Image (tube, rainbow, N blue to C red):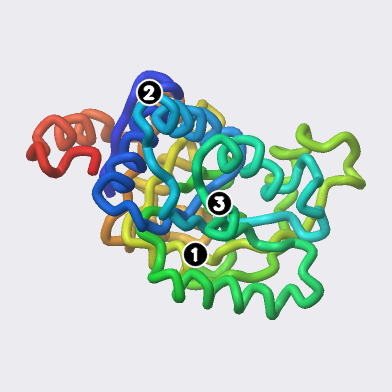
Amino acid sequence: MEVIIRDSAEEVSILGAQIVANLLRRKPRCVLGLATGRTPLLLYAELIRLHQAEKLDFSSVSTFNLDEYVGLPHDHPQSYQFYMRENFFRHVNILEESTHVPDGCAADLRLHCLEYEAAIKEAGGIDLQLLGIGSNGHIGFNEPTGSLSSRTWIKILSEKTLKDNAGHFRTPEEQPQHVVTMGIGTILEAAHCVVLACGVQKSSAVKAMIEGPVSSMCPASALQFHPRTTVIADAAASARMDHPEHYRWIEQHKLAWQKYS
Ligand code: PGA
């Protein structure tokens, strides 16, 4: 894994956006895998800024989001469809029909999951998958002890994740316990995975993902098998790792073409 440590969440986000922007400039018709949650908000803000200031062009891009809550309609403020529209899509020149977020209200959810996988394949596969990491090591909504080769499916959230995200909902009854998420197997097929991690609450999961054994207890550790994963973590999220000086050494000695592409 490529591990990049930055002082602040802002620096993490700007570097993440730079990697996405570099891909867009190199391959305008690229397929992006997108994430939601608190972590990528600044990255989306930076991509919007690049669109406005430097005309970064999203007109040929297609996107596939990682996950969605079961039962929340598209216009629900906590749905990820709503999040993506408000925080990113409506601010850039992306075509609505090129954006895909799993439909948590699909009449036949199981069929929808199969169709979502097929749509990713049909688009040519994901060039760059953005990921956050849960404090319990989940990526997408793939919770600990789930299969490390799972595909897009309906999953049950762990109590830890429900607790971490409870603040987004007015009442516990409103918070869905089921989600549709790309599986670990789906994520591992992306050409490049970029994980953003910010804040001390992620520090144990970040250590387990990078330095721990590969284990379904930390689903993100499956990325150790991925040929090209970049983790960008702020100082707080990196605090528990045993080898920060090694990651800095590697970063300093990369050849110019290897950096942030
Ligand atoms: P967060 O969520 O960015 O809101 O912390 C990350 C995740 O659960 O993947």
Mark 3 vs mark 2: which is more N-terminal?
2
Q: Which numbered marker is on residue 184?
A: 1
Q: Which numbered marker is on residue 138?
A: 3
Front residue of 77/233: it is 77
Mark 3 vs mark 1: which is more N-terminal?
3
Q: Is residue 145 left or right of residue 69?
A: left
Q: Residues within 10 Å of mark 2 (few under 14, many from 20)?
A: some
Spatial separation of the CA atoms under disc 3 and disc 2:
23 Å
Image position of 161 with respect to 51: above or below: below
Q: x, y (%) of residue 251?
A: 18, 34
Q: x, y (%) of residue 48?
A: 48, 31
> Within 8 Å: ligand 1 and the Cβ of disc 3?
yes
In the picture as drawn, the residue positioned furthest to the top comes out as 7
**Mark 3 residue type:** His
Element on which disc 1 rests? helix
**Mark 2 residue type:** Glu
Residue at left 77%, top 32%?
A: 167
Quarter of the rendering containing residue 261: top left
Tell me if I can see residue 142 in this picture.
no
Spatial separation of the CA atoms under disc 1 and disc 2:
27 Å
Q: x, y (%) of residue 18?
A: 32, 34
Q: Residues within 10 Å of mark 1 (few under 14, many from 20)?
A: many
